[in-house]
């Protein structure tokens, strides 16, 4: 009877992740900024979460000695070091090559006197430190985290693109004051409930890797005889433990960044769905070979006389201020021949004609694309990235999520409607 339960569990996981995949697909349906990932480039996508951190990050607590030893002495520092000493607030950017936000360590206690003491000068400058009575992230601590974000060099850079912060449904993350503070930095988007263990990048290995590399830092320290002697005597003060943890976290975070694989935590959880027709590298634990294919047909099909307002497209534009444009400078290539040998690098500008042959849309031709979000493009059609709407009176309708279709949408059109601009 165990096997049916296991199959049922896998089926539920698959169903839950399908819901989350559609959730991520929806947030990418916006005016295109990046030709691979849509509105939010990898450098604009962040995930933050908390990781409990003990002083001793040892999972199996094994003692190693030479084979054949008749007696093995094991001496541990005083009990309690294996319990949570602090909470690590980890924030990761989906772009492995981008500058990453500082880790934030939340220690236990009020910290009023400590923050005004000389101890702060001994903390590692690569991390930020906060205090909370129980080393938790409550509403007040979350607001202080937002303040630290505003001081972080990553978020002080001038940029035109909007940022997206992915997080779970922790009460502190939904605190109204925290949300107001985060509005200055970007948009908060909460994961659907009950699936964060599958779709949150930090839960997909980043948090575990941080604890692993912190443990490696302890192993290196134990090679120092003076440290080893103090370790076996269990004589580390709270001040010394705080200083050591900041240094270990700083070194561990650097090691993770050097690996250059932060983006994989986002890819494997479906947080970086591609829009260019290339396969998504989703690899969910417990769901081998999972593939997400959106069921709705996010395309515009103008091959019939049907009302355009009922069409669907792959992307949305929640802005209604489309450029009306001016078709007075439009020069069309004469003839109906279509250069199928064009490449995306050439960025052939085109104009889309309505059925009455009046100019309707401007865009960039994408002849190499054979599919639009998993759907095959008919041979008599060509994919175009919409850049401008020349006739705002002609509605493009709404997509499956009820959002307005517009600039930034990838759609395919009849080749007879697509004319190349000189």
Image (cartoon, grey):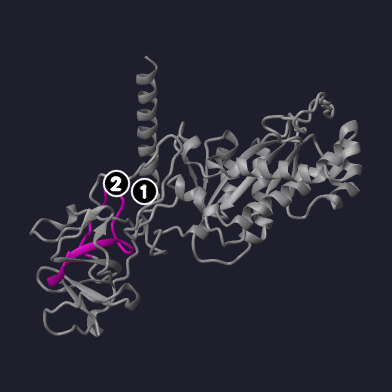
Which quarter of the rendering shows the N terminus? top left
Relative to residue 337, is residue 72 drawn left or right?
right
Question: Residue at label 1?
Answer: 25
Toward the top, the furthest residue is: 1
Relative to residue 289, is residue 227 drawn left or right?
right
- Is 324 contained in the magenta span? no
Helix, strand or loop at disc 2? loop
Toward the front, the furthest residue is: 68
- Is 400 contained in the magenta span? yes
**Which residue is painted at 37% across and 42% down in the image?**
289
- With respect to residue 168, does 356 lie above or below? below
Magenta span main SS: loop
C-beta proximity under 8 Å, tags 1 and 2: yes
Question: Residue at label 2?
Answer: 294
Relative to residue 89, is residue 23 drawn left or right?
left
**Which residue is painted at 64% across and 38% down in the image?**
51
Distance between the Cα atoms at labels 1 and 2? Answer: 8 Å
Q: Which mark is residue 355?
A: none
Q: How busy is the neighbourhood of tag 2: few (under 14 within 10 Å), some, or many (20 plus)?
A: some
Q: Which residues are magenta?
A: 393-416
Position in image of residue 304 (x %, y %): 8, 59
- With respect to residue 73, does 128 lie above or below? below
């Amino acid at each position: 009877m165990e096997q049916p339960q296991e199959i049922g569990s896998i089926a539920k996981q698959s169903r839950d992740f399908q819901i989350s995949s559609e959730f991520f697909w929806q947030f990418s349906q916006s005016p295109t900024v990046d030709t691979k990932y849509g509105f939010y480039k990898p450098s604009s996508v962040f995930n933050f979460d908390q990781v409990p951190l003990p002083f001793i990050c040892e999972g199996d607590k094994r003692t190693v000695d030479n084979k054949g030893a008749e007696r093995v002495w094991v001496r541990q520092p005083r009990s309690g070091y294996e319990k949570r000493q602090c909470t690590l607030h980890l924030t990761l950017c989906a772009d492995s090559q981008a500058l990453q936000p500082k880790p934030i360590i939340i220690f236990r206690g009020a910290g009023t006197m400590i923050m005004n003491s000389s101890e702060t000068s001994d903390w590692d400058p690569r991390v930020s430190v906060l205090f909370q009575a129980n080393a938790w992230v409550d509403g007040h601590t979350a607001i202080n985290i937002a303040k630290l974000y505003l001081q972080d060099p990553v978020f002080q850079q001038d940029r035109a693109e909007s940022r997206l912060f992915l997080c779970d449904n922790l009460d502190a993350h939904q605190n109204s004051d925290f949300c107001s503070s985060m509005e200055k930095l970007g948009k908060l988007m909460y994961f659907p409930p009950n699936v964060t263990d599958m779709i949150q990048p930090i839960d997909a290995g980043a948090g575990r890797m941080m604890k692993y590399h912190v443990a490696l830092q302890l192993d290196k320290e134990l090679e120092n005889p003076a440290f080893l002697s103090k370790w076996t005597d269990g004589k580390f003060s709270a001040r010394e433990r705080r200083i050591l943890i900041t240094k270990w976290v700083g070194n561990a975070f650097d090691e993770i960044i050097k690996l250059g694989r932060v983006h994989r935590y986002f890819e494997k959880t479906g947080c970086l769905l591609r829009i260019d027709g290339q396969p998504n590298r989703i690899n969910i634990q417990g769901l081998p070979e999972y593939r997400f294919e959106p069921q709705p047909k996010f395309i515009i099909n103008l091959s019939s006389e049907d009302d355009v307002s009922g069409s669907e497209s792959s992307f949305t534009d929640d802005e209604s201020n489309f450029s009306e444009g001016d078709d007075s400078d439009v020069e069309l290539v004469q003839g109906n021949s279509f250069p199928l040998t064009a490449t995306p690098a050439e960025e052939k500008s085109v104009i889309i004609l309505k059925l009455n042959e009046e100019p309707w849309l401007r865009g960039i031709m994408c002849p190499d694309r054979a599919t639009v979000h998993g759907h095959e493009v008919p041979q008599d059609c060509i994919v175009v990235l919409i850049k401008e709407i020349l006739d705002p009176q002609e509605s493009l309708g709404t997509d499956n999520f009820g959002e307005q279709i517009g600039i930034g949408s990838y759609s395919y059109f009849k080749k007879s409607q697509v004319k190349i601009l000189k």
